[in-house]
Image (cartoon, rainbow, N blue to C red):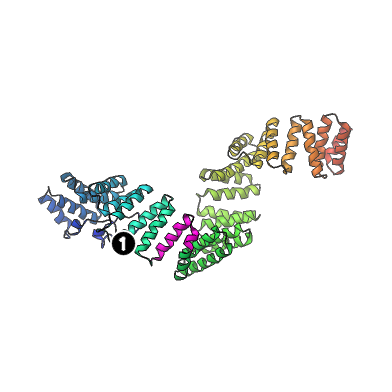
Amino acid sequence: MSVGTIRWDGCRPLLAFLVVFSAVVMAQPQLSLDDLRRETTQHPDSTEAWINLGNGYLGAGDYDKAKDSFLEAIGIDYRAGDAHFGLGLAEFERGDFQSALFSFGEVTRLYPDRFDGHYNQAVTLARLRRYDEAAAAFRAAIAQAEPEAEPEDVMGAYLGLASQLKQAGNFEEAARAYSDALALTPENAELAYLHADALYQAGRGLDALPELTDLEPNTSDYRVSALIADIYVEEGQVDYALRSLDRALKKADSAGEIGAEANLYIKLGLLQRRLGREAEAARSFQRATQSDDGSWEAFYNLGVSYLESGQTRSALDALRKAIDINGDSGEVYLALATAYDQLAKTSEALDNAQAAIQRLTDTTLATEARFIVARALYRQEDFAGARQMMTQVLQAQPNNAQAQLWAGLVEYQQGNYSAAVQYYERAVQLDPDSVEARINLGAAYLASQRYQDAEFVYQLLVQQNPRDAESYYNLGWALLSQDHRGAAKDAWQHASELGYQPAVAALTQYF
């Protein structure tokens, strides 16, 4: 019985387990709707007649007329609990959950010992996603289970309680609820799995292992082996995890669970990628796509695996397929934008990064997408747009050395050399080993006429790489601008000997 289903024990043969009628209603003889309507005509002041008619309409699926009948009954006797209860059922089926909640609330207020009132109040609260209140209502139902509720009713309440506790993130209490349910049916393998999963979610995976390892040989349920693998991964026991995933895959394959098999291959691939086994990870993701060619996650992870191993063009096909299957995933658009960015396909990178920003909720990933947009706009010479986007990137990641570097490039292209210097200096500070940042810092110093600072930077660059002809050339300009003609000539001479033609031209012009 799912938590989102109202219970109706009185009509189990017709609408299995939708709602619970009271004992009084269950005792009523089965009459036709014509007979029930005739009863209300003959006895218009009879609460019982109107309740019976409402129940008849409920059974026939005419919830609007059921509502009207129960309202008539309540108008005659407001303390008629079965009328409030039936009205709650009708409102629930009509989709008016707030009104259903009020009606079931009146049942519990007027008759606090009614299990069915608390239970259906809990179901309605769950439908409204008021998880803590739903859990409290399920607890109240459990407390009032005797003598009305059947064992399966109590089990449903425990499962409902556990479900709402999980939704609220209270996995410790959810595990306790599953444990109480297990006490009612100790051999229930599904409950044993759910109990172990709640323990794992509560950070108590090791406590769940004994139960799971006892269960695993006696079940064909792949989820048990997969959960064991998750626990081993969390504990750093990779070899055990890989073996457990292998057992899970065999069980999923035997059961013909195509989607599950694909998900398990994805899980295996992620573990292999985490271990640096990129080739194995790619094979696992490839097998996932073969198991289920409708799994966008499989194609996405295959594409990411190709990206991380430098197979950018191979990544494109997999990522395009992922988008064909699921065009709403910001992560896929971001990965595709990254691939196009690496291939210097500026327009495609821009389009996909913008699509990613529209869909991503993770702020870190959204910042990555904005960075790609900023670089693309820069390459399209939209420097104002690039600056606006780069400002957002730096607000989110002020210690991103690459972002500082690109912000400097944007300012430099707009002639804002002093601003460029500030960004480049920060980039060098964050990444002292970045030759690219130092080269651009030297150029910005030259452009802003800070020749002594430029000289210092280029001296460091040529010391690091004596074959850096361009840095020797720029060093010559820094020295000449300070009227150090001899040193400037030497620098240009070095650049000329390294084959840098602008240095040859400078020597001819100035010496």
| Residue 205 belongs to magenta span | yes
Say whether residue 480 is left or right of residue 208: right
Front in this rendered view, residue 272 or 233:
233
Q: Quadrant of the C terminus?
A: top right
Q: Quadrant of the N terminus?
A: bottom left
Front in this rendered view, residue 431 or 70:
431
Question: Residue 450, percent across and down?
Answer: 76, 30
Asked if residue 57 is positioned above or below residue 409 in the image, the reply reads: below
Count of numbered labels shown in the rendering: 1
What residue span does the magenta drawing correspond to?
A: 188-209
Residue 17 in view in this figure: yes
Front in this rendered view, residue 125 or 344:
125
| Residue 391 belongs to magenta span | no
Q: Residue at x 36, y 51 (%)?
A: 135
Asked if residue 127 is positioned above or below residue 390 in the image, the reply reads: below
Using a 10 Å C-alpha cutoff, classify the residue at mark 1 as few (fewer than 14 neighbours), some (14 to 19) or many (20 or more).
few
Examine the image and state in which quarter residue 493 appears.
top right
Q: Main secondary structure of the magenta part?
A: helix
Q: Which residue is mark 1?
A: 152
The secondary structure type at the circle numbered 1 is helix
Asked if residue 237 is positioned above or below residue 400 in the image, the reply reads: below
Examine the image and state in which quarter residue 11 appears.
bottom left
Question: Residue 2, percent across and down?
Answer: 35, 57
Q: Which amino acid, by three-letter code, is at mark 1? A: Glu
Question: Residue 299, percent across and down?
Answer: 55, 57
Residue lying farthest to the front in this orientation? 207
Q: Residue at x 10, y 50 (%)?
A: 43
Q: Residue at x 63, y 61 (%)?
A: 279
Question: Residue 17, percent across and down?
Answer: 29, 59
